[in-house]
Amino acid sequence: MGRSALLASIEARLAANGSVVLTGPSGIGKTALLEAVGDAAAARGELVLRVAGTETERWVPCSGLAELLDQLPDTLTADLPRERLTGLPAPHPAMPTTAAAAKAAGERALGRSFADRSGMDHVACRLSFRGLLARCAGDRPVLLLVDDAQWVDAESVHAVRYAVSRLGSRGVRAVVAGPWPDGLAAGDGGSTPWAPAPDALHLPVPPLGPDELAEMFDSYGLPVRVVNTLHSDSGGNPYLALALGGAFTDRIPRHWRPAPLPQRVQAVIAERLARLPAQAHETLLMAALAIRPTTDLLCRAGRAEAARDIRRAAVLGLLITEGGGIRFTPPAVGTVLAEAADAQHLARVHRALAAVVPDAAGRARHRALADPGPNAELAHSLVTAAEQAVRQGSHRMAAELYRLAADRSPADPAAERLEWLVAAAETGANGGLPDLVHRAAEAVLASDATHAQRVRVRLALLDLSGQGLAEMGEVFAAALVDADGDPALLGPLRVRMALGALLNGAPDLAEQEADGAIAHAREAGDTATEAKALALRANISLIEGRDDYVRDLELAGRLPEPPLDGQMHTTPRYIAAYCAIAEDRLPEARAELLRMLALVERGSGEEVVHVLRNLSEVAARTGRCREALDFADRAMRIAEQAALSPGPAWYPGALAELAGGSIHRAVALAERGLRASEQENDVIFQSRLLHVLGVARMRLGDVRAGVDTLWRIEALGSAPDGRGRAMRCPMVLRWHGDLAQGLVALGEVDRAEEVVRTARAAIGDRARGAAVTGLLDRAEACVLAARGEPEEALALLRQAATLFEQLGQPLEVGHCLLEQARIERRRRRAGPARKAAADALEIFLRCGARPWAEQARHRLARLDMGLQDGPAPFGAVAQVTLTEGEQRIAVLVGQGATNQQVANRLFLSVKTVEASLTRIYRKLGIRSRAQLGSLLGGAPPEKGVTLHP
């Protein structure tokens, strides 16, 4: 799963009669790769010989070789004595099972003289094995697969290396797999690596990416949010991810809460830690006890070899380093290390860290952890530090400090301890610490807490659910009971109820709840809740396409600004920036969002994700493609590590990839985000992700699938009771113009015209000067061109391009130029067509818009070859269906290979290659190898023509 590129590299090496060494930590998937390679080779008719080393037989000479010989055809070995083949008697049936016993028994069985032999028996053994493989290779290629190669005995290693080195050119190859990560030598806890041939290709097996891991878990029924967390916790190691995933059950909807650590995971952690020296254990323990560990911090705390120790642990898969920080994979590595140390040892490490951490809150935390037991004075100092951390936006640190204060607080007064547990739950929810939140909430709800404290921890649980508020009915009901009619408690609760209704596609109900929240807040004199409720009502009005959102934002602006409590994304300030994006005041929105990011960037919760999300969208619209990708990547990483709802993070990821990354990657992110949003019943992000997914599919050439995807937004907007559920306003979700262009490409011109007309009626005069007008103008230009009115179409395109220039949206300008080039080429005006395409290419290159630049290059190439463009929108290439074999031939020929070279590479006859090329030329509408090379650009399919096996 997710190893197609790696398998292709292995297969290419084997096809050239080369050998391969696969390296990587345990559980990374080396055995699965060996099985896949072996199955493919067996299907081709090759002789496949398999051996897997075991620690208990490492000291038994020729044990691996004997296993390989047992798999040779009987016709070759029936008349040969075992001693002739291996130099050894047959193994005794009662062979010892431990490594030490096996070594001792082997020495006794062979006699002490074995070590003193002249070596002639060893030479005969290797020559015999080589001779047998040579006879096999005369009939068919031979493939040796060696797994757990670090445990294969030395004599078998020598025999394999000798045979493969001498017979490689005759079709005897080997794939060897072992846990030899780069940078970890035998002295560092590894074993000595060996290769079957001097020129063997060494391939590290990388961790699975989020997309591949999601595909692996598709059949397990786990929520996407859980899978996203599993990727973070496992570091992409498939065995670890499967072991961690086994702790979740489908009947308990706790996808925001960690599950108990499985025994299999503990065994993997123990096995990896055992390969590290004691000094590395001490370094890792210090990293585990720090809240934000870095190599520099560990060095200052006395771990002089920290860089080396961290590197050792990283190559073993125990941790990963990101942006200078250290993160354990899985996080339980830190727990295992801490549990193995005694209290005095832990206290010493905490004191060392307290002396070097740069912030006062961190120093307070380590001093408290170094001094267990009740201490009222210490508890109050921790609370003071926690309050400071909240003001700085460090909600994770604040939650840890509040929890510690509660732990260090004496039994009396109990009310004080409960209050700190409530604060721990609230700040933990805003910092993305689900385990801490649940533990704190359970402690509060099991005690004699007040109604207010019980409601507050339930609100923390609601905040922790993110976009999944629809699943929190039980918590909502319990909170209403606990609120007992108190307006001070009902106000914040009804704000969450309004947000849940909005996400669930019930804007009318959401507005009713927001009205109720405003009334309760005013009754209680709670200006912060009132401001947030007004901002939420403004957001509802904007999504519904009404103008009264301006009034609500003005009312909210007259109230004191809500404090920095980890909920920036619910404040009037944030909603005002969101409205500025909808109104195309992008420079203003960007400036305000950057100021907000400076306030929240020390956090790790939803507020950071939403600020980064909007910054990424603004960057994509304004042509800052690299910046868009960076902001989106940060949002996705935070959402994964904090177990947040993935939809709001994957949406900007897909949008940024569509603008400046990979369209295929955009499709993958949009599809995963859509599944996550469907599971959480989040209609808002379902609509947004459907828009990105539909456009991406059309730009890949599958116009029908793209149009059908966009129509799903319309279907999402009609609930069974007749109320609209999706985002109604074309100014907020601008999908109508893209749908119209897709319909034109399919020849459904009348429907396209109706879509444009309906959207214009919905926005009325409010959208004058807004980008949505330009989008609809461009779509209408496509309609006019399809009706045979090119002059009117070009006039609309120029008008739209001028508007986009004024709004500072260069990618939309380039899109208009591509449409202009297509229309001019259909009029057989090659000069204006080429100029428009070249101007578009210049814009896209300046913005770093890679997918758009490739489409512009493709259009220029077709113009240079005199090929006619079809009616496809977005500069997309019409879908071409090539078989898998034709695709391989097309890529090789496009890269300059001759027919003979292609035939040798793919094990085909030259006539087969020639016949395939004829079919490829006919399907692509070209006539020469030069045209094929220009069409493909020597690049992967996405950068040229869209190939579908």
Image (cartoon, rainbow, N blue to C red):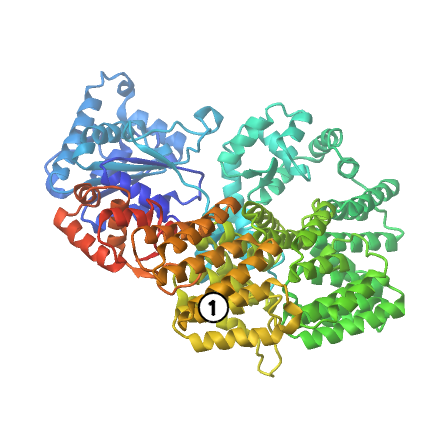
Residue 537: x and y, percent?
74, 69
In the displayed structure, does residue 137 sit left or right of residue 681? left
Please identify the quarter of the rendering in which residue 457 is found: bottom right
Q: Residue 338, relative to residue 649: is it above or below?
A: above
Mark 1 packing: few (<14 Cα in 10 Å), some, or many (20+)?
few
Q: Nearer the viewer, residue 75 or 698?
A: 698
Whether residue 258 can be seen here: no
Q: Would residue 23 be visible to someone looking at this image?
A: yes
The one nearer the camera, 734 or 399, is 734
When asked about the image quadrant of residue 759, the answer is: bottom right
Q: Amino acid at mark 1?
A: Glu
Residue 849 placement (x, y as % from top left): 49, 49
Mark 1 lies on a secondary structure that is helix
Q: Residue furthest bottom?
A: 721
Residue receiving disc 1:
792
Q: Position of residue 353 (x, y in %)?
A: 72, 31
- How many numbered discs sit on the rendered protein? 1
Residue nearest the observer in this picture, 684 or 65: 684
Q: Which quadrant is the C terminus positioned in? A: bottom left
Q: Quadrant of residue 492?
A: bottom right
Using residue 723 as the reference point, say whether residue 224 is left or right of it: left
Residue 613 image offset from top left, x and y in percent: 62, 54
Q: Does 395 sit above or below residue 732?
A: above
